[in-house]
Amino acid sequence: MAFEQRDNSGSLFRNEKKTQDNHPDYTGNALVDGVPKRLAAWIKTAKSGMKYMSLSIKDNEERPKPINSAEDDGYSGPPQGGNPEYGDVPF
């Protein structure tokens, strides 16, 4: 059975293509009110020392490849296939 994204839910996966500090630590996708969205998350540390995730949610539009690699945020779309580190999650 193929994976079907449920409305108002999403998934994040470790960004294996991260090459710069400003690239997201996790990327993925979501479906919000029937509209596909791109997700990005960064692991950050608050002044109190507590770790948290900072999130970005954007419309899932096709965008041209950046010419300057400094403009590249490391996001190449949702991962294809299973994640070998975590295996396929059945839910």
Image: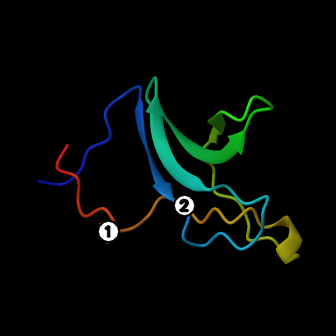
From the top left corner, tell me how far across and down residue 33 is, in percent: 46, 23
Q: Residue furthest left?
A: 1
Query: Eyeballing the image, is 88 above or below 52?
Result: below
Type of amino acid at the residue the image marks with label 2: Gly
Residue drawn at 74 percent across, 71 percent down: 65
Residue 64 is left or right of residue 85, and the answer is: right
Label 2: element kind: loop
Which of 73 and 33 lies nearest the eye of the viewer? 73
From the top left corner, tell me how far across and down residue 69 is, in percent: 83, 76
Q: Quadrant of the N terminus?
A: bottom left
Disc ID at residue 81: 1
From the top left corner, tell me how far across and down residue 2 is, in percent: 18, 54
Residue 50 is left or right of residue 82, and the answer is: right
Residue, disc 2? 77
Residue drawn at 54 percent across, 60 percent down: 77
Instruction: Give the crowd class for mark 2: few <14, some 14-19, many >=20 residues within 10 Å.
Output: few
Q: CA distance from mark 1 to mark 2?
A: 12 Å
From the top left corner, tell me how far across and down residue 11 is, in percent: 42, 44
Number of labelled discs? 2
Which of 29 and 63 lies nearest the eye of the viewer? 29
Locate residue 74: give its quadrant.
bottom right
Type of amino acid at the residue the image marks with label 1: Gly
Label 1: element kind: loop
Instruction: Give the crowd class for mark 1: few <14, some 14-19, many >=20 residues within 10 Å.
Output: few
